[in-house]
Amino acid sequence: MIGPFSIVVLTGAGISAESGVDTFRDTDGIWSKVNIEDVATPEGYVRDPERVHAFYNDRRRGLPGVVPNAAHFALAKLEREFQGEFLLVTQNIDDLHERAGSAKLIHMHGELVKAFCDRCGHKLEWRADLSTGDACPACHGHGRLRPDVVWFGEMPYQMDRIYDALAKCDLFVSIGTSGNVYPAAGFVAEARAAGARTVELNLEPSEGANLFHHAVHGPATKIVPDFVESVLRG
Ligand code: APR
């Protein structure tokens, strides 16, 4: 079998679970404790910006206390050693992929460690708490800095680049995502339409499990390194 020449990997919260980062829809996941409408929609932000800031401040404060796991490191190794084209698209807003060494990376739902001004558009790194009291360093507008996180109803980032990569890939791997949220949940169909082999690596079958040619179920720290070795061995 001729090896893949172009790989696209999609990750979700499940790849960070064993690092101690909460997932969204597992039992006692984030959405069992907080309403999406209140903290992950533009309307929720307009209604109560400080409540939204508190939600992301809490998650941003947790980042220094977690570290990448074997699955993050395995994907960074695949990027380094794979001879063809590689793109990692993550739905996650944590910085564990970068800290594991991934570089060919798109955060389609934004990043917890970035903020942007919804008055002038200025984007900057922001690792501290954020509040309506903070001023934009570019336009000096007060209360206009928001987490650089894509909320429900907003357009994810770099979709053209992602669809372009999916149209050309011959291996698509989905890791640690429940397949509940579009457009990410539709990527497997795009890859199949392009003739790619599609693989799901997840703790359990996702919503879109039947759309994948292959599946391996188990904890990411076990099944992702094994899968990466199998791809690199060719
Ligand atoms: N190893 C592998 N997979 C795991 C592990 C693990 N240790 N733990 C959990 N999983 C799987 C779960 O079985 C589930 O299918 O990870 C998936 C996590 O699903 P969600 O919590 O729904 O997270 P995700 O799919 O990333 O959510 C997508 O929804 O709320 C929005 O913007 C948010 O990016 C997020 C998007």
Image: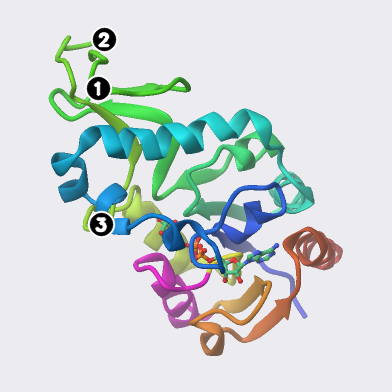
Q: Are marks 1 and 2 in contact (CB under 8 Å)?
A: yes
| Label disc, if present, on residue 122 of the rendered structure | 1
- Badge 3 or badge 2: first in the primary sequence: 3
Q: Is residue 184 magenta?
A: yes
Q: Is residue 58 magenta?
A: no
Residue type highlighted by circle 3:
Glu
**187 and 169: which is toward the camera:** 187
Nearest-to-viewer mark from 3 and 1: 3
| Label disc, if present, on residue 37 of the rendered structure | 3
**Mark 2: few/some/many CA within 10 Å (<14, 14-19, 20+):** few
**Mark 1: few/some/many CA within 10 Å (<14, 14-19, 20+):** some
Residue type highlighted by circle 2:
Pro
The span from disc 3 to disc 2 (Cα, nearest Å) is 29 Å
Nearest-to-viewer mark from 3 and 2: 3
Position of residue 9 relative to residue 2, above or below, is: above
Mark 2, secondary structure of its residue: loop
Q: Quadrant of the C terminus?
A: bottom right
Mark 1, secondary structure of its residue: loop
- Identify the residue position indicated by label 2 in the image: 137
The span from disc 1 to disc 2 (Cα, nearest Å) is 8 Å
Image quadrant, ligand 1: bottom right
Asked if residue 84 can be seen in this view, the reply is no
Image point 17% across, 9% down: which residue?
Answer: 140
**103 and 220: which is toward the camera:** 220
Mark 3, secondary structure of its residue: helix
Image point 71% across, 41% down: which residue?
Answer: 68
Give the magenta part as a residue range: 178-195
Q: Is residue 85 left or right of residue 231?
A: left
